[in-house]
Structure formats: structure tokens, C-alpha cells
Amino acid sequence: VEDRARFEALYRAHAGAVRTYVCRRSNAAMADDVVADVFVVAWRRLDDVPDSPLPWLLGVARRLLANRRRGEARAAALHARIAANETTPSESSSASESARTVLIALEGLSERDREVLLLIGWEGLQPAEAARALGLRPNTFAARMYRARRRFARALAASSEHTGRTQPSTGAEVIR
Amino acid sequence: MSDTTIDLVRQANPIPSEMAPPPIEEVWRRIDQGAVSDLRDRAAGRSLVRRARPGRPPVFRGRRFSIGGLLTTAMSVLVVAIAVGALVLLGGRRGGPPMASTSGEFATRQQVLQTLGVLRAPPSPAARRAIACARTAPTAPSRAFFACQFSAVPSFFMRPPDMHSNPRARRAAREMAAREGYPRLDTSLLRVVAIPQFDATVTIAPTTWQPSPRSRQRAEGLITALNYSRGQSGTGPEPTSLATVTNHGMWVSDAQATPTMTTVRGAELVPDGVDKVTLEPIRIISAPAPVVARQFGSVSADVHDNVAAFRFPVLTARNSHRASALYGVTVIARATWFDHGKIIKRITTQVYLSITVQGQGPGGVATNP
């Protein structure tokens, strides 16, 4: 009974965040399925769930998504996301144009670099929590973050050229 | 963390606010069905360990291509190809069992999960202690080792062949493992079920069995152990197949016989869907005295966490040609499985019971007549 109550509390507190995480990286139809799988694993491994469970849950979700995507084209979801942006001309303000450029730059990164940036930028995790979600030590995560930023700046510059738009922040400014 | 890069990424977030959680019912439904692949379960733990030590990318120094290097590589490839070919041919001639693929192993593990609901529940405190012992496998002599000896981990897992400090014991253990195989415990699925009426517990340990530690051949199965105050008895190092559990149930009983014992305690592991089991002994194999199996009586027990607990009397019989002793016997029993009062299966199963023989000399214990 205690386990059940603890599990339900865990679900109430974090299922929304896990769902959002999955939706940001895949289509909404797959999200609920993945969320259910994440919490089935959490139930079976309730003993291993740490006191601060969100990074752990996101780590499980990340691996489940990776399993599902195996064999699929990389970054298909981001493609879809970009396509979706393109189909909403009413929102073609400078903000959405900028977002599109950033998404294209993110798409150009490797999965590893992209995840480092997204866990901080989209999921709002602290670096130590993001390191835990990726199963890395904080120092390793910091090094990876540094490299990801550098590559993102390069990709952003290339993306800006491609879209014919002057990016407000490029090069050294972004690397910093 | 706030800087230009992260701000840019944040602004491109397609879903800026957190979504509502989906209903929890779907999770409970999947838990009840056990419909989750353990590839995912393993992904939750093992890859974390692997990723904690990322391998360095290969570093090339000097010239990348040279004739000598190419020749060496070509020769290596040739030697490996010949070796692999020879192994395949020899393996084929011996007619050994086909190697189980990794996916096959996981698929079978999933079947184990789907068959036994107790494995799908989170571990109890006793199981957590046992899992910790099984994972750390402390070596003797140490406080941790002796503490773990009384945990619910089947004893042969606590002392793998290489952990014996005495070289003779180590050699003997290795020989036994080479003869009987190497069981590999699936620690994350180790579960301990309490039997309060016996003040005992039953350990359920999903285990793969392999002919050698490095062999890729796997046989998926289960090992059970009955733990009580006087010690532990189990099914031994060779796992019983899931099919046996599904078709006949799996029996584990009190092996620590004493001349004064009057009952034998035992437990039967049964698949999901069985809520009551009745056992009726019908035949004794190699009875040490003229005893009729039906004298053991018919016993019924409710199933909790896939385990039904039984208590059978120790029969007494005279045989002047045998030494006076308590004999362990194999008994064929008719088993009836019930679900909500409805009979769902009638089968035979093997149970291990005891008979006290009053014959020549003073009483003792003889487990194998």
C-alpha cells in the first residue's frame, strides 16, 4: 500500500513533465505510450528511484525513446516540428522565424550535443540534474556542454545563412 | 543557467509550458499485464553505468595508411575469418544446441514476467536486502559476507567458484560448475515472498543458466529457495524452466530434516491466475517402507504472490530390513489448480516429503533411501 501511494504521488508530480519531455522530442501520439512505459519501469524499480526523481525519469524516457527511434531517421521529430512551423504562416513573426533557425541548427547537431542543450534549455534542469539524466559525471557533462555550445554556434551561423536571415547572436557571442 | 545559447534554445521551445499528465489507469493496466520489455528495464540501470565511463575516441598517430599496416590488417582479418569458419564447422559437427540470441533471451525473460505477477511488483524490504547482497557478492571472511549468508539469496549464488579462498575448494567448485553449468542470477527480478504461518520466506530467483561463464548459450529459468530459521533449502543450481512452472508448478520443501520432525513444510510456485492449489499424494517413488501415498492426505492452500504454502505430516512405518531413520522421498501428487472456486487445471507434480522408518538400530536421518 505504501509503495502504491508513493508511486501515485510520483506519477502526479512528474508524469506531466515526462509527457512534455517526450512530446518535445516526438509526436504526441507516441507520448502517452512512452509515459506509461516510463512509469511501468519506475514501478518495478521503485527502489532505485532517487529522492529527486525527475532526472532519473527523464533518463528512462530518453532511453525508451532511443529504443523506439532505432532504425528511424534521426531527428525525424524535429523535421516534423520544422514542417509544422512552416505550415503556420500566420505566426511567421520574427520570433517564430528565429525559433525555426534555432531548430534547424539543433537538428544539425548530433543527438548527444542536442540533448545536452535541450535538457537545460527546454526541460529547465540544472547542470547537475541534467548530468544525472544522461548518466554522466558533472565534469563530463560540463565538458560536453562546452563542446555542444561551440558546435551549436557553428550550426546556428550556417542555419542563418541558409535561411537568409541575420541572426542576432552568432559566433563568439553564443559560444560564451 | 542563463546565457545567450540557452536563451536562444529556450525561445525555440515548441511546448513552453508543462502538459497535464495522462491518466494513470493505462500504467496500472500495463503493470497488471506485465507488458513491458526488459530491454527497457535494463536501460534504466545498466546503460547508466556504461555511460558513466564513456570510451575515448580512437586517436590516430603518425601516418594513417601504410603498406605494412594494410598487410597486417589483411592478415589479421584472414586469421579471424579462418578461426570463425573452423569454429562454425566444429560446432556444427558436434551438433550442439543452437545459440540463443540476445533478443530471444529477453523475450523469454518477458514471458517470465508475464507469467509471475510477483515479479512485476516492487521488491519487499527482504527482497531489497537480498538484491543488495546478490549485487555486491561480498567475499569471506567479512561482516558483509556473513550478514548476507542469512539473506534470502540462494546459497550457491553467495559463493561463486572464484570466491573460495581455499584452492582445493575453488577447484572443486569450478569442476562442479563445469559439470552442472553456471547459473546467472537476474538480480533486479529477485523477489522474496513471506509465509507467515511457517515463519519462513520463499525466494524466487529468475536465472539464466549457461555452460560456461563466457558462453552465449542461455537457458532461461527459475530457482526457488525456502528460507526458515533452521536454514535454507532450494531447487539447486540448475534453473527450472518456465514451462515446468506453467504446466506443473514448482515445489520447494524443507530439506533440513531432523529425526524428531513431525511435519514437512513446502511451497509451490504457480503461475498467475491460480488462487488455490490442492495437492493429493498418489505415489511414492522408491518408498523405504510399505506406506501408501494417500496416507499423507490431501492438503489445500491459498495462493499469495504466486506461492501456495503446504504442510504435510511425516509418516511412520516399520521395515526391519532398513536402518531406523527419517527418509526423504519423492512423491507424485495430483495437483488441482483453482481460480475463484473453479477448477482450471488437474495435473501431476513432484513433491518431496519424509517418512520415518522404524527398523534396525537407533533412529537417524537418511535423505536418500
Image (cartoon, rainbow, N blue to C red):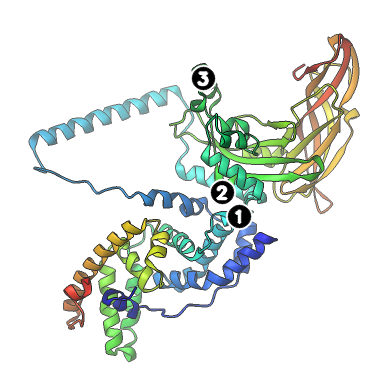
Pinpoint residue B143: horizontal percent, then vertical percent: 58, 35
Q: Nearer the viewer, residue B175 or A135?
A: A135
**Discs 1, 2 touching: Cβ within 8 Å:** yes
Q: Nearer the viewer, residue B126 or A116?
A: B126
Which residue is disc 1 drawn over? B34
Q: Which mark is residue B166?
A: 3
Crowding at dot 2, Cα within 10 Å, few <14 / some 14-19 / many 20+, comes out as some
Q: Secondary structure at mark 3?
A: loop
Residue type, numbered disc 3: Asn
Image position of B286 (left or right of A56): right
Q: Chain of mark 3?
A: B
Q: Secondary structure at mark 2?
A: helix
Are the residues under badges 3 and 1 in a single subunit? yes
**Discs 3, 1 touching: Cβ within 8 Å:** no
Quadrant containing the C terminus of chain B is top right
Q: Nearer the viewer, residue B337 or A94?
A: A94
Residue lying at 48% horizontally and 50% vertically, measured from the top left = B42
**Can residue A102 be seen at all in this image of the molecule?**
yes
Residue type, numbered disc 1: Gly
Crowding at dot 3, Cα within 10 Å, few <14 / some 14-19 / many 20+, comes out as few
Q: CA distance from mark 3 to mark 1?
A: 44 Å
Pinpoint residue B84: horizontal percent, then vertical percent: 32, 30
